[in-house]
Image (cartoon, rainbow, N blue to C red):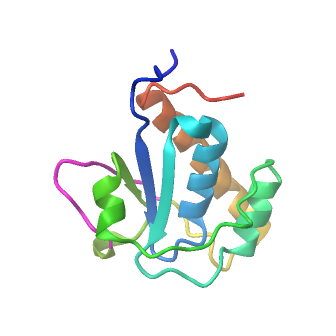
Amino acid sequence: MTTPASTPRPTVLFVCVHNAGRSQMAAGWLQHLAGDRVEVLSAGSAPKDQINPVAVEAMAEQGVDIAHNSPKVLTDEAVEASDVVITMGCGDACTFYPGKRYEDWQLDDPAGQGIESVRPIRDEIKARIEGLLASLDIPVQA
């Protein structure tokens, strides 16, 4: 089932502390698998200066380019604008608003890890994104 054109597309915000690995990979997968049917945001409570190069490499292996993304600071406005907020290991540092759909994905942090350790994290994120899309009734685009 496809989302009708008259239905507003949902906004999904991915949050991790540094916005340099997990949340960037999740945003990349969601954009890749959903296209323009979902608005994708990512942010961090203490963003780094650049995306983890090993995360970029792992995603590039799957044909998903996140190399030109940049870490962004988490704002109240981003949380307020989002229909779904997915946190990844930021604990109390992430803003919480009642009434939003929240999920906390417990994922290993790719920071400081080599490509062999980051690939399973990347693959787990993809599987979770596919589940998220199914829950939003949005088919994965080919």
In the rendered structure, the answer to whether residue 87 lies left or right of residue 63 reads left
Q: Nearer the viewer, residue 7 or 31?
A: 7
In the rendered structure, the answer to whether residue 64 lies left or right of residue 121 reads right
Residue sticking out furthest to the top: 1
State the residue at coordinates (59%, 62%). 24
Residue 40, placed above or below residue 138: below
Q: Is residue 102 magenta?
A: yes
Q: Quadrant of the C terminus?
A: top right
Residue sticking out furthest to the front: 6
Residue sticking out furthest to the left: 98
How many numbered markers are drawn? 0
Q: Which percent across, then down, holds residue 18?
A: 51, 77
Q: Which percent across, then down, holds residue 81?
A: 33, 54
Q: Which percent across, then down, holds residue 124?
A: 60, 48
Q: Which percent across, then down, holds residue 126?
A: 62, 44
Q: Nearer the viewer, residue 46 or 7?
A: 7
In the rendered structure, the answer to whether residue 89 lies left or right of residue 113 reads left
Residue 83, placed above or below residue 65: above
Residue 80, placed above or below residue 95: above
**Magenta stretch, overall SS:** loop
Q: Is residue 4 magenta?
A: no
Q: Quadrant of residue 120?
A: bottom right
State the residue at coordinates (64%, 38%). 33
State the residue at coordinates (31%, 64%). 77
Residue bounds of the magenta highlight = 94-106
Residue 129, placed above or below residue 70: above
